[in-house]
């Protein structure tokens, strides 16, 4: 089968969780017999496609199934093309109204109309994929009028190999000492920025957030507040060239996010055997077990208690990390390959409700 596996604005999303998830999907598809096409346009660009259309009335390339990973006009065009040609359409829900809020300046005001748009857009699909049962429930609440199937974002364990070798280099570079509490990814308030910084203010541990943050007019007031004047024991590193340095330098992964569809960085930290502290959310209880492969916390005092426990008990850190590593293996690229192949076969057979990896 020839599958269009399309990520609109791909060059701008390479540092995002969406971009990472798509990378994982494509690595997974390399393990299958699927023939993957990454652009819907003739000559791989809409401008050249328009010229081709003027010459021979061909704008789109040919594909047997379309799988879109974003929600913009290019993806809408692909959805319409799929409907015109009776080509099965899979839409991947990386974006929800809930995780769009508190991401950049004005995002809260846009979240409500975005929900209306997402309900319309996702309802065009023969099958909607999403990272978790939690996200499936969110989409059903809109409601999206299409079958919905959770498929893990996966984790590229092989790409993290050798992270230990970066420890001293990155700790020296960012002046980190002792048990270092860290986060990885774009700096947003939704991801628990205020809680992260307030915990730093309440403790003596070194805190480091590895990831880019906005400084221009699109940055939220909260991001500007904390990144421009952080607590003395907090380092915002900005973009780092090799993410293995973050997992090498850090000791306890702290993720007090307010809303998440799965959290790829959580799986990466677990794959590196790090002790993980998460906010107690339904999406995390879906995948992880408190006290076994993570610690789940509900408020600032619980987060602080968890940090103090891990600082006082290195054996607990090691046990949680070892169990977390086993959990991460359950989300391998091989599993993603298995699940995507099953999805494509079921949708091509006209039975999107019958999706199985058995």
Image (spheres, grey):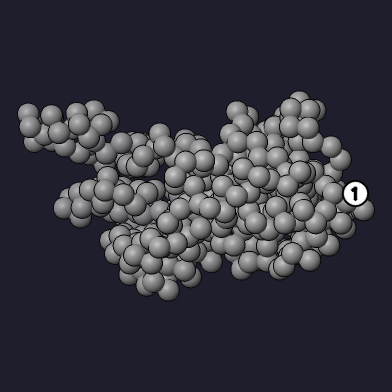
Q: Is residue 335 visible?
A: no
Image-quadrant location for residue 308: bottom right
Q: Which residue is drawn at the image coordinates 47% and 41% (left, top)?
A: 216
The local secondary structure at tag 1 comes to helix
| 306 on left or right of 5 | right
Percent across and percent down for residue 96 are 44, 60
Query: How dense is the environment of label 1, judged by Cα within 10 Å: few (below 14), some, or many (20 and up)?
Result: few
Q: Is residue 273 above or below residue 86?
A: above
Q: Which of 146/121 is in front? A: 121
Q: Position of residue 97 (x, y in %)?
A: 43, 63
Q: Is residue 320 left or right of residue 299?
A: right
Residue topped by disc 1? 314
Q: Nearer the viewer, residue 211 or 216?
A: 216
Q: Is residue 46 visible?
A: yes
Point 76% across, 40% down: residue: 250
- Most foreground residue, 45 or 279: 279
Name the quadrant of the N terminus. Answer: top left
């Amino acid at each position: 089968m020839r599958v269009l596996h399309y990520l609109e604005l791909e060059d701008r999303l390479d540092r995002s969780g969406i971009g990472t998830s798509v990378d994982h999907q494509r690595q997974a598809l390399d393990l299958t017999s699927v023939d993957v096409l990454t652009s819907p346009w003739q000559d791989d660009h809409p401008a050249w496609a328009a010229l081709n259309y003027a010459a021979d009335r061909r704008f789109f390339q040919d594909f047997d199934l379309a799988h879109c990973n974003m929600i913009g006009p290019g993806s809408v065009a692909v959805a319409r093309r799929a409907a015109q040609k009776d080509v099965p359409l899979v839409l991947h829900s990386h974006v929800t109204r809930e995780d769009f809020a508190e991401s950049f300046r004005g995002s809260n005001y846009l979240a409500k109309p975005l929900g209306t748009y997402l309900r319309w857009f996702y309802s065009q699909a023969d099958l909607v994929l999403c990272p978790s049962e939690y996200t499936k429930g969110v989409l059903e609440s809109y409601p999206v009028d299409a079958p919905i199937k959770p498929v893990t974002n996966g984790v590229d364990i092989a790409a993290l190999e050798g992270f230990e070798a970066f420890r001293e280099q990155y700790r020296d570079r960012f002046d980190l000492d002792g048990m270092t509490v860290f986060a990885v990814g774009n700096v947003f308030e939704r991801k628990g920025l205020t809680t992260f910084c307030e915990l730093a203010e309440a403790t003596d541990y070194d805190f480091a957030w590895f990831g880019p943050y906005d400084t221009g007019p699109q940055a939220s007031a909260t991001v500007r507040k904390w990144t421009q004047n952080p607590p003395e024991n907090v380092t915002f590193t900005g973009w780092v060239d090799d993410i293995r340095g973050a997992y090498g330098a850090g000791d306890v992964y702290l993720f007090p996010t307010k809303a998440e569809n799965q959290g790829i960085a959580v799986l990466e930290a677990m794959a590196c055997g790090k002790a993980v502290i998460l906010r107690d959310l339904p999406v995390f209880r879906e995948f992880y077990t408190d006290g076994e492969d993570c610690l789940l916390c509900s408020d600032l005092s619980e987060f602080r208690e968890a940090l103090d426990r891990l600082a006082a008990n290195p054996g607990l850190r090691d046990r949680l990390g070892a169990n977390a590593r086993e959990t991460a293996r359950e989300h391998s690229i091989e599993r993603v390959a298995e699940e995507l192949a099953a999805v494509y076969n079921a949708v091509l057979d006209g039975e999107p409700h019958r999706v199985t990896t058995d």
